[in-house]
Amino acid sequence: MISNPVFLYQSPLVIMNNEIKDYALEYRASSVETTVKKLCEAVNHKITYQSGTTDVLTDSSTVVRQQSGVCQDIAHVFIAALRSLKIPARYVAGYVRGLRLSHAWTEVYYNGCWHGYDATENTCQLEHYIKIAHGRDASDCPLNRGIFTGTAVENNEIEINVEND
């Protein structure tokens, strides 16, 4: 069993209301792994990737109602569905090789370890993903935070080098 149960409960952006619980129950299977894969695909089909429809404070229940959002939102809905079935899940923030923007995905705990899933892309093949942080939801994992003043436009440029041992 997981040593820290915090990844089983609601958090500020992961709301487990009755709609999400009922939705998740439709995809419960005989094994946790099969349930996770079915839910990953189901969330991928339910939530349309569309930027500009949410912000950093949008929670999973709002995303389910409007059925659109970005990778952060899709991860939150997936996490809410998993947690409502008592499957430990955590939010992951990082980068994907070849993409110039940050990305969000989910890690799910079963069979004694954490497994990565990306409901935005409906995949568990995450070899090109670079994890920066994990937490209960996006509010635990800010990739940049600060105070900005003036009229200058913020321009972030990220360069990541990965070396194998």
Image (cartoon, helix red, strand yellow):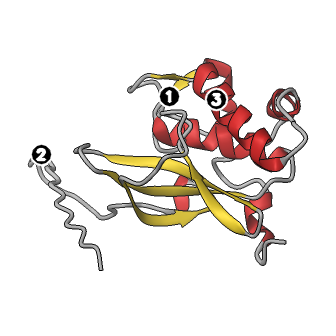
Q: Residue at x 68, y 26 (%)?
A: 42
Mark 3 neighbour class, 10 Å CA radius: few under 14, some 14 to 19, many 20 or more: some
- Give the mark nearer the N terminus: 1 vs 3: 3
Q: Amino acid at mark 1?
A: Gly
Mark 1 neighbour class, 10 Å CA radius: few under 14, some 14 to 19, many 20 or more: many
The residue indicated by pointer 1 is 69
11 and 117: which is toward the camera: 117
The residue indicated by pointer 3 is 41
Eye-nearest disc, 1 or 3: 3
Q: Quadrant of the C terminus?
A: bottom left
Please give left or right for residue 85 compared with residue 101 in the image.
right
Eye-nearest disc, 1 or 2: 1
Q: Amino acid at mark 2?
A: Val
Q: Quadrant of residue 129?
A: bottom left
Q: Residue at x 54, y 37 (%)?
A: 73
Report, in whole angstroms, how far the alpha carbon at label 1 lies from the one at label 2. 24 Å
Secondary structure state at the residue bearing disc 3: helix
Eye-nearest disc, 2 or 3: 3
Report, in whole angstroms, how far the alpha carbon at label 2 lies from the one at label 3. 37 Å
Secondary structure state at the residue bearing disc 2: loop
In the rendered view, would you say 133 is above or below 155?
Answer: below
Image position, residue 49 (x, y; %): 46, 24
The residue indicated by pointer 2 is 153
Q: Is residue 15 visible?
A: no
Please give left or right for residue 63 compared with residue 61 in the image.
left
Image position, residue 31 (x, y; %): 86, 46
In the rendered view, would you say 76 is above or below 52?
Answer: below
Q: Quadrant of residue 21?
A: top right
Q: Residue at x 17, y 53 (%)?
A: 156
